[in-house]
Image: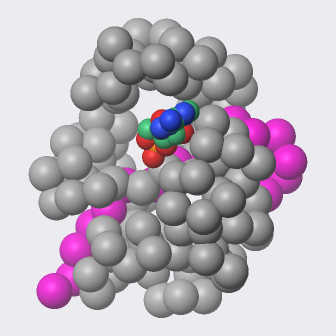
Amino acid sequence: AIQRTFSIVKPDAVRKNLIGAIYSRIEACGLSVVGAKMLHLTREQAEGFYAEHEGKVFFEPLMEFMTSGPIMVQVLEGENAITFYRELMGTTNPENAAAGTLRCDYAESMRFNAVHGSDSEESAAREIAYFFTENEVCAR
Ligand code: CMP
């Protein structure tokens, strides 16, 4: 089925001028960008977005990293977009990421891992609604 998923180009990748490279890879594999914007997350926005990780050892460094510079947030649409985009990203830890994945090519570590993607339909719906109003996502 055609799905929508939520994606972030994280501060490390934006700093390295990789926005276009990552968009190219997304589009080359058949996913379409149907909503996009650049943001510099506030602490409050980052805490709300990652609320499920509050209390974990990596939470504080994650907040520091995700508020360290601008990010691109986008809504991606395509056949099985959620799973498909997670496959394109590769594993959270780039050391285990398969060749040809975004994290294999662009991530430095578990923390500085270049991209985010929703892990389920529920997260996708929540994450898209967290950053986009209905008229900011364009049907195509
Ligand atoms: P993301 O897909 O954005 O969702 C949660 C983020 O927390 C994850 O990517 C990583 O950047 C980070 N993360 C998850 N696990 C760890 C970990 N063990 N150590 C450091 N960062 C982590």
Residue furthest out toward the right: 16
Residue 99 screen position, x and y as percent = 68, 80
Quarter holding residue 47? top left
Image side of residue 108 versus residue 43, left or right: right
Kindly identify the residue that appears in the image at 76 percent across and 68 percent down: 105
Residue 29 belongs to magenta span: no
Horizontal side of residue 129 vs 40, given as left or right = left
Span of residues in magenta? 1-19
Which residue is pictured at 58% across the width and 52% down the height?
93
Image-based side of 85 in relation to 2, left or right? right
User: For residue 6: magenta?
Assistant: yes
* Residue 17 seen in the current view: yes
Relative image position of residue 35 (x, y in whole percent): 42, 58
| Horizontal and vertical percent position of residue 135 | 27, 51
> How is the structure coloured here?
one colour
- The residue located at (60%, 88%) in the rendering is 28
Quarter holding the C terminus is bottom left
- Pick the front one: 117 or 111: 111
Relative image position of residue 19 (x, y in whole percent): 72, 57
Q: Is residue 139 visible?
A: no
Q: Please, is residue 88 above or below residue 127 in the view?
A: below
Q: Nearer the viewer, residue 104 or 70?
A: 104
Residue at image point 82% right, 40% down:
15
Check the picture and name the quadrant holding the N terminus: bottom left
Q: Is residue 6 left or right of residue 14?
A: left
The tally of labels here is 0
